[in-house]
Amino acid sequence: MDDPADPDLAGALAGGTEGLLAVHDAIAADLHAYAWFLLVPGRHAADDGPAEAVLDALLVAGETAGELVDPALSLAWLHALTRNECLRRRPATWPAVEAEAAELAAQQGLAAAEVAAVLGRAVRPVADAGAPIPVDAPPEWLRAELVAALGVEAAGRRAELARRAHPYDPEGFPIPADSRRLSARALAWSAAAVVLIALALLVSLPVGDPTGPLPGPALAAAAPAPDDAAGAATAPAPLPTLAATTVGAAPVTTSAAARPQPAPDRGADRRPAATTPARTW
């Protein structure tokens, strides 16, 4: 592999169409070999998947070069873009991540930090990576397709490729698509758990008059206190006490209106008693 200086790659990525074509001429063969390593095992050797993955990765690089924080990692960044495009075309058989690390280190010449950036995590490569897999050269149509895809008519395609390449991590590397799938699965399980908890709470709540106050001391304490006038109007009557009641009799109150009044003097209505004349002896 011709190992171009990463700053030169960074400058080329910022150079528009001509710069992206220069990147293709410098490392398309290496990116194609990496894509071949990922996709071809278990598939037909004439499959165009590796070349198509490289083409899309280069188009994404041209649209999102500003995402990369450290230009010295341009080579690793291009490999990361290529890997993500291969993951979108993932076959039934996929190399172990340790074998990927060995391929990136031994055949692509990336340092350990660059390998970790491509894979999204630090991985110890396998001790014996074996003989390199024979790789066909990139097809001749790849460069011609790249030129056509950089035209004005293909702006929509480039924008869509750039959109689906996100999200990027804080260093500007695309988050691996296989990690995104795991995150989406975890998010789905979390959402299901929230729904189950909400349903359990709804079932456990007491059912009452929807227009009346809800039960509970906390809600009662939170209710606004009535003003003096309303409180006086709605205050319940006091219960009678022992002092105001007599067993077997009606309750006696102390108000003047309720006390029994004395019977009127009916002396004037009575006839005077007949008097007997005194006898004389």
Image (cartoon, helix red, strand yellow):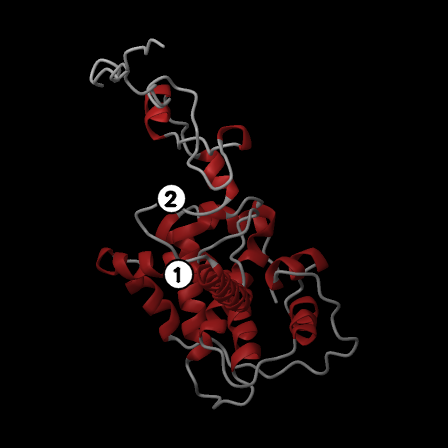
State the image coordinates of residue 94 (x, y, percent, origin top left).
58, 81
**Camera-nearest label, 2 or 1:** 2
Type of residue at label 2? Pro
Q: Nearer the viewer, residue 138 or 92?
A: 92
> In this orientation, which residue lies closer to the viewer: 136 or 130?
130
Q: Tell me the residue that label 2 is attached to.
A: 213
Which residue position holds label 1? 164
Q: Give the number of the disc on residue 42.
A: none
SS for callout 1:
helix
Residue 207, horizontal then vertical, whole percent: 40, 58
Sequence-wise, which precedes: disc 2 or disc 1? Answer: 1
Q: Is residue 104 above or below residue 49?
A: above
Q: Is residue 175 above or below residue 139?
A: above
Residue 243, image quadrant:
top right
Label 2, label 1: how far apart the Cα atoms are:
52 Å
Q: Residues within 10 Å of mark 1 (few under 14, many from 20)?
A: few
Hey, which residue is sitting farthest front in the picture? 281
Q: Residue at x 30, y 47 (%)?
A: 211
